[in-house]
Amino acid sequence: MPSWKEVSQNGPVSNSLSENLVEAEGLAKRFGDFVALQPLDVKVQAGEFFGVFGPNGAGKSTFIRLLTGQLRPSAGSAKVLGINVESKPRLVKSNIGIVPESESPPSYLTAAEFLEFVARLRRIGDIDKKVNYWLDWFGMTDKSGTLCKDLSKGQRQKVMLASAFIHEPRLLFLDEPFVNLDPIYQRKCRELLLEHIANGGTIFLCSHILEIAERLCTRVAVIDNGRVLAAGKMDDLRTSKDETLEDIFIRLVGKSIDQIESETTHEEE
C-alpha cells in the first residue's frame, strides 16, 4: 500500500509515534434498557496495530461505530485523529478508512463503478489508475464490470477492502476484514496491513480469527458484555509463555470449549 496521507481539520498532523490517534473517555452506548457498551477508556497511539476481541454481542462493532461517527454515544466522548467524533463525524469519516462488519457495496453498481464513486467522494486524483490498481491487486480485473449483487461474498469483501484503502488513509478501522476471504487473500491482506504499519499507519481491528490477529496486533483488548476485561501487549496478558491469544480469550471470557459445546447441545434440543 502506498504511504498514508496526513490530513486533519487544520492541515497536516504530526508524525509523532507517541501521538494518540484514538482516544475514548467514558465512552458508552445504550439502546433503551440494553447496555451495548459500558463506559470505557481506550487510547491507541500512532503506529499501533490495536485489536479488539470478544464473543458475539460483546460490543465490538458498537465500539467501532461510535469511534467512526456512525453512532452517537450515550455517555463519554471520543477523539479520532484529534477530531471530536460526536461534533464532527463527517470530518472523521473523511480522514479514515472503514471496513464495516456486514455492509456490502451497492448492489446495482459494478465493482469498478463503486470504487470510482468512492474515489470521487474522497476527491482523490488519478481515479482510473487507483481503481485499476486495486482491482488488479485483489484479482478482480475480470470482475470489474460485474454488478456487486452478482459477486461472491469474498469478492464483495475484496471490493469493500479496496474502498477503504483507495484514498491511502493514515488510520484504518477494520471490523472482521478477513471474513469470506480465501487463505491466499487472507495472507495478502495480512502482509498489506503490516506494510501499512511499517509505513507509519495505524490500525484498529475487530476480528474473530484469533490466529491471524495474534500475528498482527501489537496490543489487544478483550471485551465481553460491553466491558473491557483486559488490555495490553500479548506478553502482559499471558499467564504462561505458551498461552495463545485463543487461550487468553477463553480464560478471560470465562467459558471453556466444553461449556460452549454443552450450551450448543442444549439449544439444539
Image: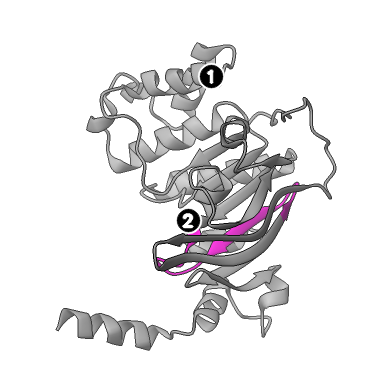
Residue drawn at x 49%, y 68% as measured from the top left: 54
Relative height, residue 211 to residue 268 (above, below): above
Q: What residue span does the magenta drawing correspond to?
A: 44-60
Disc 1 + disc 2, Cβ < 8 Å = no
Give neighbour class at mark 2: few <14, some 14-19, many 20+ (Cα, 10 Å).
some
Neighbourhood count class around disc 1 (C-alpha, 10 Å): few under 14, some 14–19, many 20 upward: some
Question: On the image, which quarter does residue 109 sit in?
Answer: top left
- Find residue 210 and report its horizontal and vertical position in percent: 51, 65
Say which of 45 and 24 sits in front. Answer: 24
Verify whether residue 112 appears in magenta: no
Q: Which amino acid does the dot numbered 2 rest on?
A: Thr
Q: Is residue 56 magenta?
A: yes
Q: Amino acid at mark 1?
A: Lys
The type of colouring in the image is: one colour
Which residue of the protein is positioned furthest toward the left in this rendering?
Answer: 269
Residue at disc 2, secondary structure: helix
Residue 177 location in percent, x, y?
A: 47, 48
Say which of marks 1 and 2 sits in front. Answer: 2
- Residue 161 image offset from top left, x and y in percent: 47, 37
51 or 183: nearer the viewer: 51
Name the residue that disc number 2 marks.
62
264 vs 33, left or right, is left
User: Quadrant location of the N terminus?
Assistant: top right
Residue 130 badge: 1
